[in-house]
Amino acid sequence: MRYLDEYRDPELARRLLDELHRTATRPWTIMEVCGGQTHTIVRQGIDEVLPAGVRMIHGPGCPVCVTPLAAVDKALAIAARPEVIFTSYGDMLRVPGSHGDLLGLRARGADVRVVYTPLDAVRLAEQNPGRQVVFFAVGFETTAPANAMAVLRAAEAGLTNFSVLVSHVLVPPAITAIMDSPDNQVQAFLAAGHVCAVMGWTEYEPIAVRYGVPIVVTGFEPLDLVEGILMAVRQLEQGRAEVANQYVRAVRRNGNQAAREVMARVFRVTRRTWRGIGTIDHSGLALTERFTAFDADLRFATAELSVAENPQCIAGEILRGTRLPTDCPVYGTACTPRTPLGAPMVSSEGTCAAFHNAGRTRMSTVEE
């Protein structure tokens, strides 16, 4: 099948790995910033067949995982209101807040529904004029255009019972924060292909120059990732630091202009808190002044919340790439996909879930 089997060809994978082993002459540390890439790397065992010393760090690439605990608690407070139909993608229903999750709230009678697109939530608002319909708008730049389109569609329809609880985050500022961290170990990045399909890669070019770090825009299939790692290692070995595009079948330098224009109409850049990482300037999206009528945070006057993570969970260190899930004392015991203590075990893109689903149980060799 085109775009599936051809990117999982074992013979081509062996050739790329052989070339990678010939190319790498010293230790290198590379971070992928995409939960989908993390799952492929771990599920296919790519990180276990790399040259000695070439190490993958699994970064904060899961949008569900980096949604802050305070945002989840706001969602719970809004969803508990009797006049509200609260909508979200499926993964968000199981992300633990301070006191339970949206799935548990639904079991207790709240009207919480899974939708497949934000436009489904707009249709619910049209069909239920006597109810307030709220959509939990989370994710990276990948989901922002569709969420922006939902706001535009609601505005065009004159809906007064639709709003969005926005917790969008942006990838480039997170890469900058990682490079500025005093415990940073990353020497190259694999950039998320779907994010760059929307945004292009021009935002990454000054980062590569400023920090002297190669950034390779990479797809999600096994051959994509092995080739992306090879391209990053070649740059490192040659002392180059450039933005390169492995995902040529889907990504162009300037991205999708129409999608970017829709985002710019509806959203503005703002400061955002990332779960496990902290607050990063210019790293999130919020509604522009023109569309504040659709801001669920304002409509329901949710207070600013100060909450603490479960003390047993090391999700923050996992999201920053300084620890692996197998370093966590409750990984696979008290914390499993069925009983998650932290977001990385909940989401289908979370690093902990990736390790657990792949049967990873050995102790890690990541330096503490």
Image (cartoon, rainbow, N blue to C red):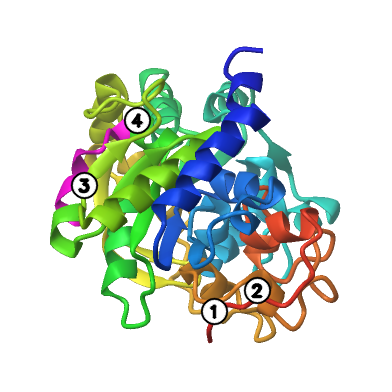
- In this rendered view, identify the residue nearer to me: 358 or 337: 358
Which is nearer the N-term, disc 3 or disc 2?
Answer: 2
Q: CA distance from mark 4 to mark 2?
A: 34 Å
Q: Is residue 365 visible?
A: yes
Q: Which residue is mark 3?
A: 242
The residue type indicated by label 3 comes to Glu
- Compare marks 4 and 2 and give the one earlier in the sequence: 2
Q: Are marks 1 and 4 in contact (CB under 8 Å)?
A: no
Horizontal and vertical percent for residue 84? 63, 44
Q: CA distance from mark 1 to mark 4?
A: 33 Å
Residue contact at pointers 2 and 1, CB within 8 angstroms: yes
Per the image, label 2 sits on a secondary structure element best described as: loop
Does 198 sit above or below residue 82? above
Mark 4 vs mark 2, foreground winner is 4
Res 198 label: 4
Specify whether residue 200 is painted magenta. yes
Which residue bears the numbered disc 1? 307
Cα–Cα gap, marks 4 and 3: 20 Å
User: Front-most of 189 and 239?
Assistant: 239
The residue depicted at 62 percent of the width and 50 percent of the height is 46
According to the picture, the residue beneath numbered tag 2 turns out to be 98
Inspect this view and state whether residue 139 appears: no
Badge 1 or badge 4: first in the primary sequence = 4
Q: Residues within 10 Å of mark 4 (few under 14, many from 20)?
A: many
Query: Gap in Å between the C-alphas at discs 3 and 1?
Result: 40 Å
CA gap, disc 2 and disc 1: 7 Å
